[in-house]
Amino acid sequence: MRIVCLGGGPAGLFFSILMKKADPACDVTVIERNKPDDTFGWGVVFSDKTMSGFRAADAKVVDAIEKAFRHWDDIDVFFKGEKITSGGHGFCGIARKKLLGIFQERALELGVNLKFETTFDDPDVYAKEYDLVVGADGVHSATRAKHEAHFNPRIDVRKCRFIWLGTKKKLDAFTFAFKETEWGWFSLHAYRFDDEMSTFIVETPEDTWLRAGIDKMEPAESIALCERLFADLLGGHALVSNARHLRGAAVWLKFNRVLCERWFKDNIVLIGDAAHTAHFAIGSGTKLAMEDAISLAAVVSSKDGDVPTRLARYQAEREIEALKLQSAARNRMTWFEDIERYVKLEPEQFVFSLLTGSQRVGHENQRLRDPAYIERVDRWFAAKSGLPAEPVPPMFTPFSLRDMRVENRVVVSPMCMYSAHDGLPDDFHLVHYGSRATGGAGLLFTEMTCVSADGRITPGCTGMWSDAHEAAWKRVVDYTHRAGGAKIALQLGHAGRKGATKLAWEGADQPLAEGGWPLLAASALPYIKGVSQVPKAMDRADMDRVKADFVSATARAARAGFDMVELHCAHGYLLSSFVSPATNARTDDYGGTTEKRCRFPLEVFRAMREVWPKHKPMSVRISAHDWVPGGLEPAEAVVVSKLFVDAGADIIHVSSGQVVKEERPVYGRMFQVPFSDRIKNELGVPTICVGNIFEWDHVNTIVAAGRADLCAIARGHLADPYWTLHAAAEQGFGGAAWPAPYQAGKLQLERNLQRAAQLALNA
């Protein structure tokens, strides 16, 4: 094959090396605009794990890189006058210029043709001459730009400004530092990459950058400002820039988050930053590029199918991994963009929030890296939660709302069972909730319990509208309280336009063939157009009746002995249909602005609060993101949450989606936690988070980092009613309250786990 790489950075050079190794007869040319020793960055960071993966691709290159590495294990964080260190991270840095030199030398050794100081603009010119054109020309790729409509790049210009500098200050660890100024907060990412120099990246939100007047400064002036800000770390050393091609405030860049829908066109393919970018906050851009090179070289040299077929396999192999890493990078990137949200945290929690901000590294991973650091975090969090300063797993600390105290941070999420008759919970529900009441969770939620017969989702939904319902629920509540220390909350709701449907396993969201009932909603919009019943847009009389139903159900909940009541304003049900702009088309006082759309749900909440005991808490569940254009988004969800908190809500239960059928959610581990994080830390209010939380490590990480106060787990509790007790045993925590009759099982489980751990250690 004849191959040309447009761009001589790590992606293009490493690919050329691997292709020549795979097929020495292959004719490979690399074209680069700049000189061989030109570089516009300072250092590059890899993890130890990353380097072990590269070794299999080309051990000689890795040997040369590792000889030039500056290795470190610690991360130092400087915040509010404190220095907090965590170890065991296993990072290594190398000068970007040195890295490129190693690649260039290896490429020449293998017979790659390197052309420097050669411009290129049109990949189609090369596509006619070569069998394969590799667009390795970076974030501002000319290759991508030529066929932009085909590659369809989603380019998101981010909110922070940053300047990439160097210094002769020899840092001992990867260093984060945060400085408060009269204009706002500035953040530092810094690390040593060779015997003489350290990278020094200063970052700040653009509004802070503008308030500081940096947009009007020359480079030397803004660099001098950075020297003053971080003088204590620099110890008299200067900061220098190698961005000689930039003038004025242009030395301060904005990160472009790039992800292409398609990575190839005919015999042209994108690699590295041309196809996707990863923010420097997790230092994985070069890692991604080199892993792209490994994958692309493997599929191209396979000779399995024509070139476009092989390129399709390359994208299929790499796209998911790129998305995962971009997601982690986005989480960490937005943490820095929204730094003002976190600076109210105490230093211990601030640092733990930073270290786990990508959601790829959690409490357990940090414990494996540095047990002493995690012990300090756990002692601090236990003391903050009112326990003695002992290293307790964060999930097993108590939490209080008004007079209700839950003994740990695990919640059994509200999950519809569709197993009631005429709304009455029966023996199934007693066993269902009772088994979870003995399973160790601190708080149980009932499924959405409907305030009227015509407020049900399905004929199998539970209700709370008669003395019989009240008595049946009291039986469940009384057993829960006898069974152990769990508290139980009643979630009250009205299905609205999503009502009168079949049981979930008979056809979710499909209307009943017979026996249905008229539906109500904020507006006369069916849930599934052409399928669902068209609801009646509620008038004042409807509102008064529904509000009275909620009040009556709340009073019954108090008599039944529930510890908390939750108002369901999420997932497209009746009250959610008022809150969301995607489902509320009203032009009266109950539609339009956020405040008007929330007016009726707030009327209901306030009326419920009036009859609910003052010493008991109330929560509200919201959909913080509708996942559809024109729907509710996270920023507005903060406003919605504040309205309910001001009305007396003690905690916000943060979910998302299921409001409109056309939604396009982006799933992943803990995918809804950022919404809870935002509401909790912007408003300073307690939250419950949900959404693909399935490991005890997730719970420890979320609560210790201050992203939520309680974690609701659904499917995990369906599979294992004793999820929390098993989590305690797996962590070696003996403080969880097992029922007395189950103590023998507890001891056996702990012995089995200890034996398995010992066998794994000896393997």
Image (cartoon, grey):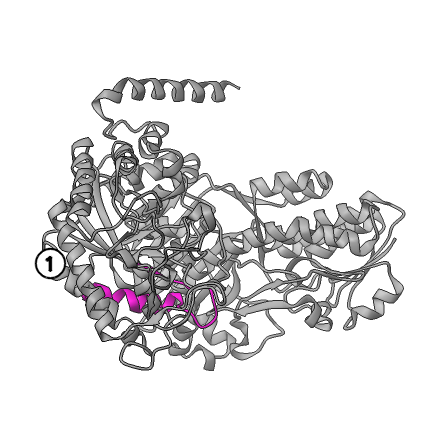
311 or 659, nearer to the observer: 659
- Which portion, as a residue range, is magenta? 621-648
Instruction: Specify whether 58 is left or right of 273.
Output: right
Query: For the residue marked with disc 1, what is the amino acid?
Result: Val
Q: Is residue 212 visible?
A: yes
Residue found farthest to the front: 514
Give how far across and how far down residue 502 sits, in percent.
42, 51
Q: Relative to 171, say whether 371 is above or below.
A: above
Residue, x 60% and y 53% (percent of image)? Answer: 322
594 or 753, nearer to the observer: 594
Residue at the disc numbered 1? 611
Instruction: Specify whether 358 is left or right of 556.
Output: right
Examine the structure image and report whether residue 575 is included in the region drawn in magenta: no
Give how far across and how far down residue 728 sits, in percent.
32, 31
| SS state under label 1 | helix
Q: Is residue 562 visible?
A: no
